[in-house]
Amino acid sequence: MIKEKVNIAVFISGRGTNLKALILRSNKKTCNYKIAYVISNKKNAAGLKIAKKNKIITKVISQSFLKIEQKKLAKILINKNIKFICLAGFMKILSPYFLNFFKNKIINIHPSLLPKYKGLNTHKRALEAKEKFSGCTIHYVSKKLDSGKIIAKKKVKIFKKDTLKKLEKRVLKEENKLYPLVLEKLVRS
Ligand code: GAR
């Protein structure tokens, strides 16, 4: 039983399966972290409903997310004693200004075996390149897109008859397993 759980903020833009996986794990007595805050840059993100259902405070940031708003948000997160920020399908690049507030405390999950297929349409590109494996990667967030130090990877086999949907589903299943495990490990260290 963990007495004091470490506060985590999760940044999302969409459906929120990774957020849900992180929350489910955090609800276990033995889990060392708690999702204390969910931030979205999309007001209609389905993940916001998941957060609200779990009684987690949410906040929608503006599309421009200018310096003054970044500073405000950083202050809020620091006041809430947030120790790590998990990007989970957050489709906006955080500025170096914001990153500076949380050096080595922001992590991201990406649906490819980095450094391969940074950016968008990862599964499509992996299929087109006739890769034998794809997967997901968790890494620290740095100034360059999908380029920070790698923390963990999970390989997923690509089958000859795979479609985009099938591959995405298989990788997502692994993402949802990997993210909570890696976060727990990081919090522990
Ligand atoms: C996930 O596949 C995640 O790896 C990807 O967005 C999806 C979000 O799904 N992130 C990126 O592509 C970031 N570069 P979710 O909203 O169900 O967690």
Image (cartoon, rainbow, N blue to C red):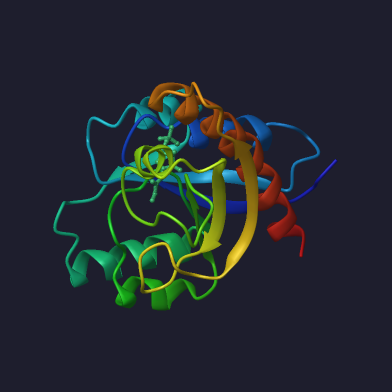
65 and 115: which one is in front? 115
47 and 171: which one is in front? 171
Q: Quadrant of residue 155?
A: top right
179 and 44: which one is in front? 179
Q: Position of residue 65 (x, y in %)?
A: 19, 60
76 and 85: which one is in front? 85
Left or right relative to 100: residue 27: right
Query: Ligand 1 appears in which quadrant?
Result: top left
**Is residue 37 positioned above or below 49 on the image?**
below
Instruction: Identify the residue at horizontal 17%, vertical 51% (top origin).
Output: 62
Left or right relative to 178: residue 131: left
Instruction: Identify the residue at horizontal 37%, vertical 67% (top origin).
Output: 75
Instruction: Identify the residue at horizontal 37%, vertical 25% (top origin).
Output: 49
Q: Position of residue 164 (x, y in %)?
A: 39, 27
Q: Position of residue 70 (x, y in %)?
A: 27, 66
Instruction: Identify the residue at horizontal 76%, vertical 65% (top origin).
Output: 189
**Is residue 37 positioned above or below 14 on the image?**
below
Q: Is residue 10 visible to us here?
A: yes
As drawn, the residue found furthest toward the left would be 64
Q: Is residue 81 visible to us here?
A: no
Q: Position of residue 25 (x, y in %)?
A: 67, 34
> Which part of the image, by quadrant, shows the N terminus?
top right
Q: Quadrant of residue 144?
A: bottom left
